[in-house]
Image (tube, grey):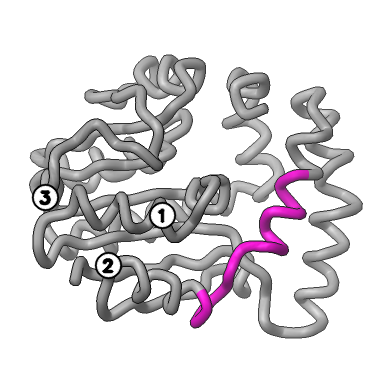
Amino acid sequence: MFGSIAGRYDTANHLLSCGMDFYWRRRAAEMVSDWRPHCIADLATGTGDLALALQKKLPEAEIRGVDFLPEMLELAQRKGVRQIVLADAMNLPFGDASFDCVTIAFGLRNLENWGAGLAEMSRVLKSNGHLLVLEFSLPTIPFLRSVYRFYLHQCLPLLGSFLTGKRNAYNYLGDSIEEFPNGSAMCQLMAGNGFTCPTFEPLTGGIVTIYTAAKR
């Protein structure tokens, strides 16, 4: 499904988020830079937007963009991601304790098993390494949540279909956001799969949330 919209994926993301996705990734890169990692795996890298933001913020770091879709990785490489790896985030081709930091933006929600995916991320992290998850969420303010749900289920599929010709991808997006754990529930999931000190920071009224944790 994602491979079929790869060519228009960036344009759709920027328009449907009203350009806020640039800010979300920039904020994530700022948080990662505070940890001063030397080796980073950006999972579900897609067309590489977060990997590129990390490269800009941490020019000396080794950053690998990992995705299981060659169509996405080809675009990421064209855009300037220096290292790309074709791999499934549920079964990473890296040894234990390979990275100082693992990031995943808008990808954990799409994994077959969220807990198993987090456990695999913990496996490839060094002791005291850091995880950052940038993911869609639901606003906590009732009015804003109602408006956002209307946008997700009524407007987004129509707009996404117009931009990419693939309405089913955007029907899936709204449903997957509804099902994904938010806030403290997500922190509990992280704590149960190899991580300690989980925290979360809602952005843009809670439309997205950045979750961070350290490897236990």
Q: Residue at x 24, y 33 (%)?
A: 64
- Look at the numbered disc 2 and give the secondary structure of its residue: loop
Q: Amino acid at mark 2?
A: Gly
Q: Magenta-highlighted stretch: main secondary structure? A: helix
- Label 3 vs label 2: CA separation? 13 Å
Q: Residue at x 8, y 47 (%)?
A: 38
- Look at the numbered disc 3 and give the secondary structure of its residue: loop
Which picture quadrant has residue 127?
bottom left
Looking at the figure, which quarter contains the N terminus? top right
Few, some or many residues within 10 Å of mark 2 (<14, 14–19, 20+) = some
Few, some or many residues within 10 Å of mark 1 (<14, 14–19, 20+) = some
Q: Is residue 82 magenta?
A: no
Range of the magenta residues? 172-185
Residue on which the image places disc 1: 116
Return the disc, 1 or 3, that comes first in the chain's sequence. Answer: 3
Marks 1/3 in contact by CB < 8 Å: the verdict is no
Position of residue 184 measured from the top left corner of the image (x, y, whole percent): 49, 82
User: Which mark, by number, is residue 97?
Assistant: 3
Tell me if residue 187 comes above or below residue 174 in the rendering: below
Q: Residue at x 32, y 57 (%)?
A: 119
Residue on which the image places disc 2: 194
Q: Residue at x 27, y 80 (%)?
A: 197
Return the disc, 3 or 2, that comes first in the chain's sequence. Answer: 3
Tell me if residue 126 comes above or below residue 170 in the rendering: below
Position of residue 194 measured from the top left corner of the image (x, y, whole percent): 27, 67
Q: Amino acid at mark 1?
A: Ala
Position of residue 24 measured from the top left corner of the image (x, y, whole percent): 47, 56
Looking at the figure, which quarter contains the C terminus? bottom left
